[in-house]
Each structure stands twice: as C-alpha cells, then as structure tokens.
Image (cartoon, rainbow, N blue to C red):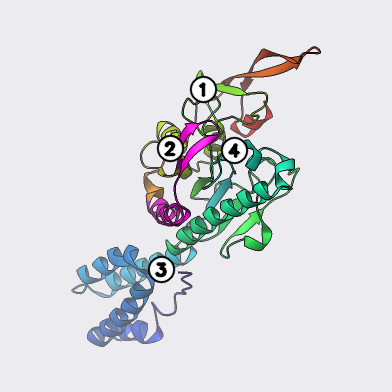
Amino acid sequence: MGVKLSLRPLWSREATTGLIAGKQAAAWTTLVVECMMVLCRCGRQSVVFLGSLVMCTRGGFFRAMLVGCLLAWGAEAQAAGPKIYIVTDLEGASGVYSWAQARDNKSKETPLGQKAMEYFMGDLTAVVRGLHDAGAGEILVLDGHGAQAIVPHLMPPGAKYITGLPRPNPIEGLDGSFAGVVQLAAHSMMGTRDGVLNHTQDSVRENRYWYNGVESGELAQVAIYAGHFGVPTIMVSGDEATCRESRKFFGESCVTVAVKRWIAREAAVLYPFAETREALYEGAKRAVAAIPRCKPYKPSLPIQAKKQHLVFEGPEKEPRVVTKEVTIRDALHIYSF
Ligand SMILES: [Zn+2]
C-alpha cells in the first residue's frame, strides 16, 4: 500500500481559518471532505477516527481541534506502519524435505540446493508482499540459515536483507523499535517425533537445549532474543509440527502457516507452491493485524540452561552424549551456549 501522508491534507488552512473565524459549517465541510480522502487511503483502521469525527459534529472549536489532532496522529501512525523483522531458515520452506537440499555449504553448490533456495525465496516474497499490503512499515530480513539462503536477484522489493557471515550479532539490527518477528521457513526442535528435518542448531551433533527445564528449539531461541526487546513472534511458517511447536510456545495469537506434513524425517507430503504462497501472503496480512494480541516470549531470568549433544570418538567415531549446564543472565546471550 505504501501510504505516505502528511498533516497537510488533514488540517488545511481553509479548515483551520474557518474554525477560528467561527464559520463552523464551511469548516466542517472542508474537514470532513479532507478526512474522507485520507480515510479512503488509510483503509479499515481509520474507521475509528471517522467514528470520532461523526461523534463530535455537534461540538465546538476545541473538540474539533482534538479530533483533528487525533486524525492527524492516526494518519501518521498508519503512514509509518509497524516495523517487522523476519528471521529466515531453509528447512521449513515449501518444497524442502531432505538434508541434501539444505544441510551445509556443499548443498548450496548443487542444483538441488540452489532450487531449495529459490523455493525459499518464493515463500519470502509472499510474506514480504503480505506484510507490505497489510500496512507494515520497514521490513528487515535476516538470512538465518547457517549456510545462508538469500538469493540477491530474487529479493522482493519493500524490505532490506541482511546476509553473510560472520555477523556482529546473532539477530543483527533487531531492537525495541520493531513491532513483531516473523519466523519463516522454520523447523521443529531436535527429536520432534513428526518433524520434517527436525533439529536444533546442529543436525549432526543432535544438539538439544532446555531453558528453565523446558526443552526448546530454534523457534524459542529466536523468541527469547526478541523477547529481550519486548518484541513478540507474530507469525511462524514451516511444517505442521513446527506450527504446533509455535502454538505451544507463543499461543494461538501467533499466526502459523504449514507448508508440508511429516512422513519421515526426510520425507513429507508437500503442499503445492501456489497454495502455500497464497497462505503465506494471507498469513502475513493476518500477522500484522495480530500484533496487539501477541506477547513477547520471556522465560524468567536468570535462565538455567542445559545442552546435550553428541561427540564422536575413537577410530569407529562412536557417538557419546555430552551434557553441559550454565546460567544465562542476559537473554541476548542465548546463542552463546
Ligand atoms: Zn534452523
């Protein structure tokens, strides 16, 4: 939509001087016409401002001033739109179901891996468009897949994209100015019985994490980091198990979009791209509307953290489980363990 408004059309000289001169009828006519023009551009959210306007048509100058300011404020807020941060991964994209498509840098060089990145960019395009059409302001995208998956020439307009490693911060640029986080192409945590490509951070060492005793995956890790800034997760996409995990951690208000269903860890029922992209587009629009209902995910501090992973030892590379426990005092250090 890209609404760009200023105070001018709302609070013109004609309306102001008319009100000051006591020419109420003429001033109100001007004001109402100008407001209607703005409302047409602002869409549904401005109905409340129209209601305020109608309610005060019998009021005096000061009430008119108040309503004018309210209208101006509403239009300005709409013009800026909520800032949205998108954290991406690859395993949860439409059409991705095998490690060969997504595991490491090597798969990036193969036709399978490159196709998977194209699939992912199709999902990302649908979400950026949906957010944009729902009135989002700035959209910042983080290439969160370990090997990086953003394909620059396929970046949809209307957002900025962070890619390349290493980076100064795990979720670079995220701060309290954002209204919501979208976790796109995400996957369920390691050990999820019905999770396509389920893992947490390291699929070879089979990492598992617990925070304050709650086993958690990458969805929760992103949300804990964002929670430090008071930013809620407003949308998650991935397979059906990922969506269930999202509902468990973030509640029903967070929008979920499933793009496939588990058959085995490397086998899935894929949903057609035309349908998943439509669902992602509509989901992104719903996610913007859901912002006021979504809560940041904030386990109590300090976080008692436990991590389990495999080490491979001896000539036979026998796996052995190693467990570590630490206290995390700052949610921004969630990835340092
Ligand atoms: Zn991941």
Q: Which mark is residue 98?
A: 4
Marks 4 and 3 close (CB-CB < 8 Å) = no
Q: Position of residue 264 (x, y in %)?
A: 50, 30
Q: Earlier in the sequence, mark 2 or mark 4?
A: 4
Answer few, some or many: residues within 10 Å of disc 2's Cα (few below 14, many 20 plus, some between 14 and 19): many
Magenta run includes residue 280 = yes
Of tags 1 and 4, which is closer to the observer?
4
For this orientation, the residue located farthest to the right is 315
The answer to whether mark 1 is within 8 Å of ligand 1 is no
Question: Which amino acid, by three-letter code, is at mark 3?
Answer: Ala
Q: Earlier in the sequence, mark 1 or mark 4?
A: 4
| Element marked by disc 2 | helix
Above or below, comparing residue 286 to residue 101 in the picture: below
Compared across the picture, whether 259 is left or right of 48 comes to right
Which is nearer the eye, 145 or 180? 145
Magenta run includes residue 252 = no
Q: Earlier in the sequence, mark 4 or mark 3?
A: 3
Magenta span: 260-289
Quadrant field for ligand 1: top right
| Element marked by disc 4 | loop
Question: Which amino acid, by three-letter code, is at mark 1?
Answer: Glu
Q: Which mark is residue 215?
A: 1
Q: Which residue is mark 2?
A: 240
Question: Which amino acid, by three-letter code, is at mark 4?
Answer: Ser
Of tags 1 and 3, which is closer to the observer?
1
Answer few, some or many: residues within 10 Å of disc 4's Cα (few below 14, many 20 plus, some between 14 and 19): some
Compared across the picture, whether 2 is left or right of 330 comes to left
